[in-house]
Image (spheres, helix red, strand yellow):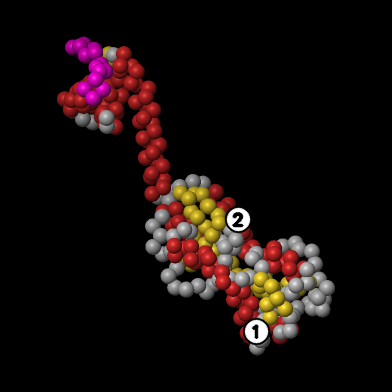
Amino acid sequence: MELRQLRAFLAVADELHFGRAAERLHIGQSPLSQTIRALERELGADLFVRTTRSVQLTAAGEALVTPARIIEAQIAVVRDIASAASTGETGRVTVGFGGTGGYTVLSALTRSLADSHPGIELDLRPQMYSGEVLDALRRGTLDMGIVGLPIPRGFETHTVREETLMVAVPARHHLSTRDSVSPEDLATERFVMYPAEHGSVVRDATLSVCATAGFTPTVAHEAPDPYSLLAMVGAGVGIAVVVESTAHLSMDGVVYLPIAGATPTLKIAMAWRPNNPTPAVHTVTRVLREQP
C-alpha cells in the first residue's frame, strides 16, 4: 500500500465523485480510477459502490476512512520533523564542559536557544577537563565542548569568556590579609592542583604563572573538581590558582586574592569539529556567535 493510494482514496471518499477528486489531486480521472482499483485488489475488498449517477462508500470503505486519515496526518508529522531536523530547527547537541565558567556560558546559551530554537536540546556532560573534551570531540562522542585556549589545530572555536586568574588561600594563611599577591610571593607555597593526566588548562596556567616568577610549584595534592580543590585549600592543604568564576563559589575558610602586576587571564572557548555535518550544531554555533 502506498501513500498516494491512500490520498486518492480519501479524495474520492470526501468528494464521492471521481471527477472532482481527480481535479483535487491534479490527475486524470482514468489514472485515479486505476489507483483505486489497485488499492481494492491489494485490500481484497471493494471500497466504493459505483453507479452512473453516484459513488458511495462500502462498509470496507467506511472502515478505512479514519485509519487512512490518521496515517496521512502521521506522515505529515514525520515530514515536518525531518524538515525541522534538516534545517537545524530541532535536534540534540551533546556538549562537554568542566569548571565553573562552563555553567555560566551554558546557562546563557540555553536561554537563547529556548527563545529562538526551542526544538534544540543540549545534552550536557559536566566534569570534563579540556583534554578530555578534545579527545571526545576527536572520537565523535561529543558534538561540542567548552575548553581553555590554546588548543591544538583541527578544531573550530569561538571564544566565549575570558577569566582572570586569582589565588585561593586558607583563611588563616599568612597571605590572606594581603590586598593582592605577586607570583614571586608563591614560590615557597604548597599547591593544590587539578590532575596532570586529564589536560587541565587551569593547571597549565598555574605552571605558567609560576614559571614567569622563576620557580616550579610544589604540588601538595591533586583535586578532581573545583569544589574538592577549594575544600582542600580551606583545610590548609595548600593554595591554588583558580579562575574568577571559581572565586564566586562560597567556601568556608577560603580567601581569594588578585594577582598583582600584569594580571594573567585564561580564554574559554566553545570548540567543535569543522566537519561536523549536524544541522543542529550549525544552529548552536550561529546562536553562540550572536550572543553579546
Q: State the image quarter where residue 212 is shown.
A: bottom right
Instruction: Name the residue tied to disc 2.
Output: 107
Q: CA distance from mark 1 to mark 2?
A: 36 Å
Q: Reading the chain from its start, which is encountered first: label 1 or label 2? A: 2
Give coordinates of residue 57: x percent, y percent: 29, 15
Give the residue type at disc 2.
Ser
- Farthest residue, direction bottom: 214
Residues in magenta? Answer: 41-55
Q: Foreground: 250 or 173? A: 173
Instruction: Name the residue tied to disc 1.
Output: 216
Give coordinates of residue 11: x percent, y percent: 29, 24
Q: SS for tag 1?
A: loop
Q: Residue at x 75, y 72 (%)?
A: 237
Give coordinates of residue 113: x percent, y percent: 53, 51
Q: Residue at x 73, y 74 (%)?
A: 239
- Farthest residue, direction left: 30
Query: Does residue 105 appear in this view?
Result: no
Q: Foreground: 32 or 227? A: 227
Q: Residue at x 52, y 57 (%)?
A: 95
Give coordinates of residue 114: x percent, y percent: 55, 48
Query: Does residue 96 appear in this view?
Result: yes
How many C-alpha atoms fall within 10 Å of the one at disc 2: few (<14), some, or many (≥20)?
few
Q: Is residue 53 magenta?
A: yes
